[in-house]
Amino acid sequence: MKRLFELLLHSLKTDGRDWTIFALSLLSAFSIWFIHNLSSEYSDFMRVQIRAESNVAGHAELSSNTCEVTARCRTSGYNIMKAWLFSRRSHNLAVKPSDLHPKTGDMFYLTKNDLNEYAHLIFGENVTVEYYLSDTLMFRFPAEASKKVPVLAVHTFRFEPQYMGIGNLTIEPDSVTVYGEPYHLKNVDRVLTETIKLENLNTSTSGVASLEKVRGIRLSEESVHYHLDVSRFVELRTEVKIETRNVPAGKEMMVYPSMATAVIKCAFPVLSDVSQTTFYVDYEDFASSISGKCLARPDYLPEGVLDYSLVPEVFECVLNEK
């Protein structure tokens, strides 16, 4: 055989190096032809297996079945070959709940018109769908246990000097629906946000905070919007008399001390006279206390007061018969 090969080379007046060059040239020509054909556009049928994924209230996030979408498409040979190679592999298609039409029980369907919006997700980019062979796609989303729980914002705020937050941090939505197996849901009574950490605040702030994932649980929302009002303040001090309220007839309640220092934080600029601020101790608080020590409540706070504190904070009360 070796002798025959040498005779063949001799008759063709060539050596092994020439054959190597010939083989490489042939391979290069084939590669150019192959790449050219893959880059050219063709019209052909493409088939894709999809599993619907959606946030349907009261149902699982992922459909329990897959559906085949068949359409005549115009695209490159490369896309057609890739679709053929992976035609048996299913992938998840994120569908808006509003596009899923309820049928009966756990069944929902998509129409041809609905599929137009998701063509680029089903067949890929740079693919033009000429027409669909698939008619209506039916998906089953198994029923899933759910309940509504509040959202608790976890936050750390630091303010610049003479600035403070007004009221509480507000979040929207303030509650979410959680889905999952009953044994997972029974231990979930709230959902936490990621830590909202803000430094050197001197103006009102808003933003978006992601919700912490809970193992085995699906949330109706992935994030919430938060807002905090921030204002510059001036701290003022004034002496106030501690009065009493709702004392029964024939009785007299004495408060010690009867005067306190009110430390009042007012929005800047100060537009009200804080000396008009009044505080009192309610008889009902005294009656329900064990030690007779009570906190004073504000009876009147001028406009623009953001916060206050009293020195001392606690007052001793004594009830006497008149």
Image (cartoon, helix red, strand yellow):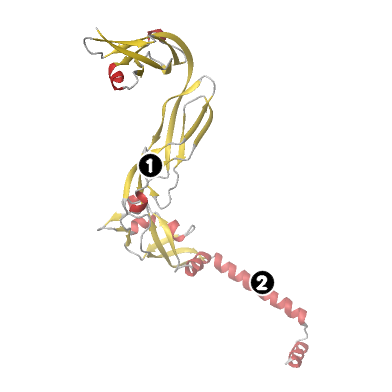
Amino acid type shown at disc 2? Ser
Quadrant for residue 62, please give it: bottom left
Q: Nearer the viewer, residue 225 or 23?
A: 225
Q: Nearer the viewer, residue 171 or 22?
A: 171
User: Horizontal and vertical percent for residue 22?
Assistant: 71, 78
Q: Quadrant of the N terminus?
A: bottom right
Confirm whether residue 25 shows in the render. yes
Is residue 314 positioned above or below 170 on the image? above
Q: On the rendered structure, is 218 left or right of 245?
A: right
> Furthest-left residue in view?
249
Looking at the rendered image, the disc whose residue lies closer to the viewer, 1 or 2, is 1
Quadrant for residue 256, please give it: top left
Quadrant for residue 280, please give it: top left
Q: On the rendered structure, is 246 left or right of 202?
A: left
What residue appears at the point 56 percent right and 69 percent down from the top-left corner?
A: 37
Q: Quadrant of the C terminus?
A: top left
Q: CA gap, disc 1 to disc 2? A: 64 Å
Please name the residue that numbered disc 2 is placed on: 28
What residue appears at the point 42 percent right and 61 percent down from the top-left corner?
A: 129
